[in-house]
Amino acid sequence: MKKEAGLSAGVILVLGVTMWLVLFANRDNDAPRENATTTPSAWECNGDAKICPDGSAVGRTVPSCEFEACPSPDRTEASVMTYLGGSPTAMNITVNPQKIVSDSRCAEGVQCIWAGTVEVRTVISSPVAHGEHVLTLGKPQVFGDYTVTLTDVTPYPKANEVIPESSYRFTFDIKKR
């Protein structure tokens, strides 16, 4: 009988401690903290875009999540960044890089006698024309009343490393002639 009474007391004690932990131990977590803020530390806006009259797109800005202003219709130059298969538009000109034709840039850590270049097969389109061109880094390509120049290609090559085509990023400058 003493054994059963001791066992029952032990079970009751364990149950009591468990209930106390469940009911009271986490109460401080619900209390407001002295340094807590009620405003979020980062704002998030919808990922939608507004198409502007020149064919470019603008996104929303924080904290009000209003659309950015469209570029001026009087502008004479723009810069767009993209990737293989991307097709950004500015000033009614769309650039769509399709394929790396060559990347002969001198790799980091290697001594070269020539800096090299990059050539990218790119489809350029406007409301009145469409054509495929091979653009060379730094060389303007005339397209109707515009010049399109491939001005930057990243990442830069490193010795003994192959750049996956999905990693390439391109910057194109578009200027009205």
Image (cartoon, rainbow, N blue to C red):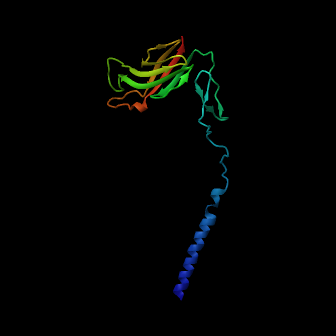
Query: Which quadrant holds residue 113?
Result: top left
Q: Is residue 63 left or right of residue 151?
A: right
Residue drawn where x is 62% and y is 22% of the image: 53
Query: Horizontal and vertical percent for residue 139?
Result: 44, 14
At x 32%, y 20%, the residue is: 112
Q: Is residue 136 visible?
A: no
**Residue at 67% across / 56% down in the picture?**
31
> Eyeballing the image, is 1 above or below 122?
below
Q: Position of residue 133 (x, y in %)?
A: 43, 18
Left or right of residue 116: residue 44:
right
Q: In which image quadrant can residue 91 be found?
A: top right
Identify the image quadrant of residue 117: top left
Between residue 116 and residue 124, name the one nearer to us.
Answer: 124
Residue with the most extreme front position: 128
Residue 8 at what x, y percent from top left?
Answer: 56, 81
Which of the pair 108/76 is nearer the observer? 76
Query: Residue placed at 52% from the left, 17% from the top?
Result: 174
* Residue furthest out toward the bottom: 1
Residue 9, x across and y down, in percent: 57, 80
